[in-house]
Image (tube, rainbow, N blue to C red):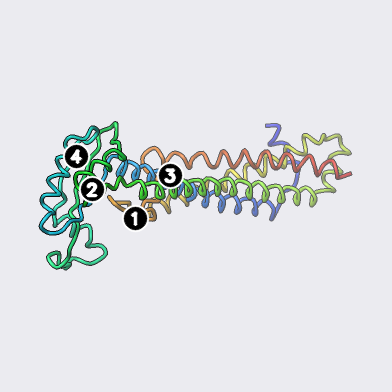
Amino acid sequence: MRDRRATQVVPGSGQSAWLTLLTAAAMAFLCVFALALALAADRLADRWQAALAQTATVRIAAPAGQIEEQTAIVLEVLATTPGVQSARVIGEDEQAALLEPWFGPDLPMDALTLPRLVEVIEAPGGVDSMGLRLRLAAEAPGAILDDHTRWRRPLIEGAARLRLLALASIGLIGGVTAAMVTLAAMAALATNARVIAVLRLVGARDSFIARAFVRRFTLRTLIGAAAGVALGMVALWAMPAAQDGAGLLTGIGLRGIEWLYPLAIPPVAALVAWAATRVAAFRVLREVT
């Protein structure tokens, strides 16, 4: 109630208040997408980690007359290797499906000399990759173990950096919001310098005057941020749903309880505006005589 009476005493801030409203809405809209990008990068890293962590591939490149013998030796070695849960030979149809995105569906598999691939599913404890490589080199010279480390590490690191970039963007959005609200509050205070002088003459304290501007800009920021979050959530809802194997761009969105996360943006934005306006108000009031 005290803040409401203070607001009635101080004239409206005009364009500064509307600038605060629009800035808060735009920043909140961008913050929703930055948050969705961070969550999508986190899901993508988890999916890549889960898909590649417990799998490996043995590639057998041997002359045509030795390929079957080498395959049998590799399967025997894998069957007696601790940490290997299962191993199977990838058929030609599966190889064709793997190559189809690059070469099309009419790839002549019979005319190509492709290595034999053996898929290895590791147990939860994992496999001693170095020891298995030494065994394969000794018993099946044409077999090469690929534990997907060189593929997995760059993908996970890239997703982690993308998540970090999205979080940094959220911090930058918060900083820009604070700066814009501070400038708008200082402009409003400077515009109402004569009103502030009159209020001081009739006995109003600086804390009473500052409350009026703090309340006004905090509420404007809260309303603008709520509108921006609503628009951002509608835009995310309208995006195509991610499918199995989809990339990052089609996976940007919110799932399940994640839809509640953007609801924290308006209160946080209002808190930032409250702190920024309070600091700006007392700074300007000290300068205004």
How crowded pointer 3 is (Cα within 10 Å; few <14, some 14-19, many 20+) is rated as many
* Residue 240: assigned label: 1
- Image-quadrant location for residue 260: top left
* Image quarter (top left, top right, bottom left or bottom right) of the N terminus: top right
Q: Amino acid at mark 4?
A: Leu
**CA separation in Å, label 4 and label 2:** 10 Å
Q: Earlier in the sequence, mark 4 or mark 1?
A: 4
Give the foreground label among 1 and 2: 2
Q: CA distance from mark 3 to mark 2?
A: 34 Å
Circle nearer the viewer, 3 or 1: 3
Rendered image: mark on residue 78: 4
Q: CA distance from mark 4 to mark 1?
A: 43 Å
Going 23% across and 48% down the picture, which residue do you hit?
A: 58
Q: Label 1's element?
A: loop
Which of the pair 21/250 is nearer the observer? Answer: 250
Residue 231 image point, x, y percent: 47, 52
Asked whether disc 3 touches disc 1, contact meaning CB atoms under 8 Å apart, the reply is no
Secondary structure beneath dot 3 equals helix
Query: Mark 1 or 2 closer to N-term?
Result: 2
Within 10 Å of disc 1 (Cα), the crowding (few <14, some 14-19, many 20+) is few
Q: Looking at the picture, how far across and down is residue 121, in whole percent?
A: 22, 40
Report the Cα–Cα distance between label 1 and label 2: 37 Å
Left or right: residue 112 compared with residue 214? left
Residue visible at 17% across and 63% down in the picture: 113
x, y percentage for residue 193?
83, 48
Observer-side mark, 4 or 1, equals: 4
Type of the residue with mark 2 = Val
Circles 3 and 2 in contact, beta carbons < 8 Å: no
Separation of marks 3 and 4 at Cα, in angstroms: 38 Å
Mark 3 or mark 4, which is nearer to you? 4
Residue picked out by circle 3: 39
